[in-house]
Image: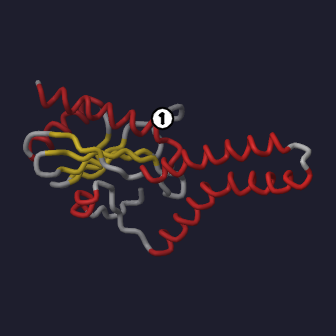
Amino acid sequence: MRDRKINVKRSIETEKVVQKHSSIDTFFRYVGNFFFVGLFPLMSGFLLYLELHRKDYLSIAIFLFIISLLISSILLLSIRQLGRLRRIPGTSQAQNRAFILSAIEKLEWKVLTNYQQITVISPPWGWLSFHWGRRIVVIYDKEDILVNCTTYTAFDDESPFHWIGDRRLEKELIQEFEKEKFS
C-alpha cells in the first residue's frame, strides 16, 4: 500500500476501504481481476467446445469446466470481499483508539499511520513469515471501530489469495481489542 489516501467518510458509508487510485491503476486492476476470474472458464470452455465435436474426452472436459467455474466463483467472491470493513462495537472514539493502541503494543505490531479517525498497522514479518505486505486498517466511527486486513502484492495490488490469513489477523486484533475493552 503505497501511502494511498483513504477516504474515511466514504469508507464508513460504504463499509469498504475506499482509496484514491489513478484511472490507469483502476483500469489495470479491473483487467487483472477479469483475467484471473475469466481465464479458467475460458480455457476449459474451449476444451469443452473441442471435445463436443471429437467426443474423445467429453466427460473429462465437462468435469474440468465445472471445476473451473467453481474456482472462478470462489475467486470472484474473494475479489468482491477485498476491502470490506468489519464493524466492531466499542465505547467512545477516544477509548477505542486507546484500546487499539494498547492491543497493538501487546501484539508487538508496527503502527504505520495514526490519525484521529484512522490507524494503519503492519504485523511484523521475517524471512519465514507469511505477513509480508499485510496492512490492517482501523477506522474509528462514532462508537464503533471498522477493521480490515489486506495483503498487497509486489506491484501494490490487493491480493485475493490471502483471504483466510487476513481474516485470522483481523480476528486476532479484535480479540485483543475485546480483552482491552472488558479489562
Figure coloring: secondary structure
Q: Amino acid at mark 1?
A: Gly
Residue 6, placed above or below residue 175: below
Q: Position of residue 170 (x, y in %)?
A: 33, 37
Q: Which residue occupies the extreme bottom position in the image?
A: 23
Count of residue discs: 1
Left or right of 177 on screen, residue 5? right
Q: Residue at x 18, y 26 (%)?
A: 179
The part of the image, by quadrant, that contains residue 95 is: top left
Residue 173, placed above or below residue 160: above
The residue under label 1 is 126
Residue 70, placed above or below residue 24: above
The part of the image, by quadrant, that contains residue 43 is: bottom right
* Mark 1, other Cα within 10 Å: few <14 / some 14–19 / many ≥20: few
Q: Residue at x 21, y 63 (%)?
A: 9
Q: Position of residue 144 (x, y in %)?
A: 16, 45
Left or right of 28 on screen, residue 119? left
61 vs 71, nearest the viewer: 61
Q: Residue at x 21, y 33 (%)?
A: 177
Q: Residue at x 16, y 51 (%)?
A: 141
Q: Secondary structure at mark 1?
A: loop
Left or right of 179 on screen, residue 122? right
Residue 127, placed above or below residue 119: above
State the quadrant of the N terminus.
Answer: bottom left
State the quadrant of the C terminus.
Answer: top left
Q: Position of residue 147 (x, y in %)?
A: 28, 45
